[in-house]
C-alpha cells in the first residue's frame, strides 16, 4: 500500500477512499489523478509496487488548476 500512496502523492493524486476486498489480499482504492499526470503512470505505479498494482481509468470530472499559467515556474504553465 505504501508504494501506491507514494505514486499517487508524487503525481498529485487525491485518494477518495480505500477498501480491502474481503477474502483476498487486495485493496480497492478510488482516487482522482490529473490527466496531465496520468501519462506513464501505469509503469510508474508498477515500479513503486513491484508490479503488484495496476490502475483502471475512467473520466470523472473537470477541476481547476489553482495556479497562474503565466508564471513560468508553475505547474499550470507546464500544462499549458
Image (tube, rainbow, N blue to C red):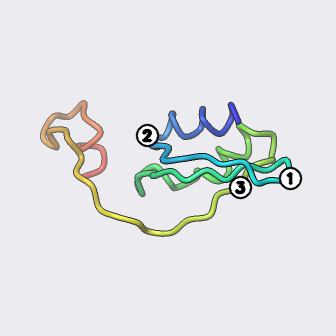
Q: Find numbered disc 1 in the image and state the secondary structure of the residue it sits on.
A: loop
Where is residue 70? Give x, y as percent.
12, 40
Contact (CB < 8 A) between labels 2 and 1? Answer: no
| The N terminus - image quarter | top right
Residue furthest to the bottom in view is 58
Where is residue 57? Give x, y as percent.
55, 65
Count residues near mark 1 (Cα–Cα under 10 Å), then give few for <14, some for 14-19, many for 20+. Answer: few
Numbered label attached to residue 35: none
Q: Is residue 79 above or below residue 61?
A: above
Lateral position of residue 61 relative to residue 42, left or right? left
Residue furthest to the front in view is 22
Numbered label attached to residue 12: 2
Q: CA distance from mark 3 to mark 1?
A: 16 Å
Q: Nearer the viewer, residue 47 or 61?
A: 61
- Residue drawn at x 43%, y 68% is 59
For mark 3, what is the residue?
Answer: 54
Count residues near mark 3 (Cα–Cα under 10 Å), then give few for <14, some for 14-19, many for 20+. Answer: few
Numbered label attached to residue 24: 1
Where is residue 39? Give x, y as percent.
52, 55
Q: CA distance from mark 2 to mark 1?
A: 28 Å
Q: Find numbered disc 3 in the image and state the secondary structure of the residue it sits on.
A: loop
- Residue drawn at x 14%, y 39% is 68
Lateral position of residue 19 relative to residue 24, left or right? left
Q: Nearer the viewer, residue 64 or 15?
A: 15
In which quarter of the view is residue 47 placed? Answer: top right
- 3 or 2: tag closer to the N-terminus: 2
In which quarter of the view is residue 78 placed? Answer: top left
Contact (CB < 8 A) between labels 3 and 1? Answer: no
- Residue drawn at x 48%, y 40% is 11
Amino acid at each position: 500500500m505504501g508504494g501506491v500512496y507514494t505514486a499517487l502523492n508524487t503525481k498529485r493524486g487525491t485518494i477518495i477512499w480505500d477498501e480491502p476486498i474481503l477474502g483476498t489480499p487486495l485493496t480497492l482504492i478510488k482516487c482522482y489523478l490529473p490527466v496531465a499526470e496520468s501519462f506513464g503512470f501505469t509503469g510508474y505505479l508498477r515500479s513503486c509496487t513491484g508490479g503488484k498494482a495496476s490502475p483502471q481509468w475512467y473520466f470523472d470530472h473537470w477541476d481547476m488548476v489553482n495556479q497562474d499559467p503565466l508564471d513560468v515556474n508553475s505547474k499550470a504553465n507546464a500544462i499549458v
